[in-house]
Amino acid sequence: MNKTRFLNVRIGDIAAIALLFILSLGVILFSYLYGKNIGTKAIVTIEGKKSLVLSLDEPSRVSVKGHIGDTIIEVDERGVFVVSSPCTYKYCIKLGHVQREGQTIVCAPNHISIRIVGGNDDGLDGVTG
Amino acid sequence: MDNRIKKAQIISRIAIWTSVGIVLAGIERFIPTPLPWIKLGLANGAALIVLYSHGLVPALIVNLLRVTAIGLIFGTWSNPAFLLSFSGAAVAVLVMGSTKFIFGKWVGPIGVSAIGAWTHMFFQFLLASILIVRHQSLMFLAGPSLIAAILSGLIIGWIANEILDRLPEKILLR
């Protein structure tokens, strides 16, 4: 056997490793593009108190009374969004739909916030061997 | 007569390399790693040596026997993680064998080992996300784990390559 080559690395080895690195980077990229979990519930908080839980599964429309007036929140198949708000700048309406876990809509003047939470976390764990 | 001796030799080699794999997998449990599913894959080195010295089928037998024995010894038998280990080991050996068969002219044990380790990790994540967890956040763990698998595959492949170079022909039965 030829033992003079450096660590016995062949051309194909380097090519294989390069290919694997590219595939891994592809997986990382994919996970950052599509990885965020779609939530199951929206928690509406008024004046700092959790007051309403909306399910994201079925469309609904609710009106909640905040600090300065009524905010209308709607759920459709694309997520939760604010239809109308009595505030000045309407940032909460411009934000549009939210549906992924951890996303939040805040309507600061009206003291209302809407947060998306997941839910089906099994908490399963194990070590393979 | 000659055929029977050859058969007995193959069976005993399979038994020896399986026991080597079991011991290596046992030792591996004491080597600390940053995350529990990132492992060196020492036992895969035994399968790699068998793949290069005896061929695909003995390597498959060695790896599956090793995984089953380790499952029985450490009590992971009959939990979902065992299913992942078992199928991951089978897929890894099959991919390593076909890589050696198709690209054997250009790719040596180091590349084959890296491909095997990567496939093992990728397949386990795929199966876990389909069967057990069904949670897309698993994908965030997959990328870094795959990079780690390449590195550990390189290390194990290099060690197996050195062993293959140094072991006498008689032991390897080539």
Image (cartoon, rainbow, N blue to C red):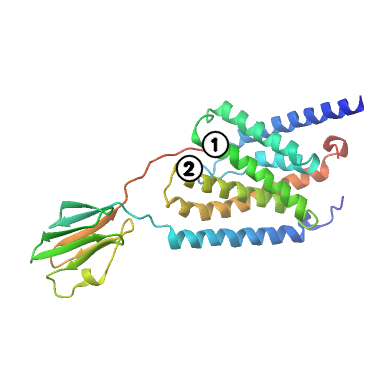
Please tell me which residue is depicted at 64% across the width and 40% down the height of the picture: B90
Which residue is labeled 1 in the image?
A: B83
Pointer 1 and pointer 2 on the same chain? yes
Residue A29 horizontal/vertical position (percent) = 50, 63
Label 2 CA crowd tier, 10 Å (few <14, some 14–19, many 20+): few
Q: Is residue B108 in view from this perspective?
A: no
Give residue A21's quadrant in the image. bottom right
Q: Nearer the viewer, residue A88 or A14?
A: A88
Q: Nearer the viewer, residue A75 or A118?
A: A75
Please tell me which residue is depicted at 35% across the width and 55% down the height of the picture: A38
| Callout in the foreground (1, 2) | 2
Q: Chain of mark 2?
A: B
Residue type highlighted by circle 2: Leu
Give residue A94's quadrant in the image. bottom left
Label 1 CA crowd tier, 10 Å (few <14, some 14–19, many 20+): many
Which residue is labeled 2 in the image?
A: B131
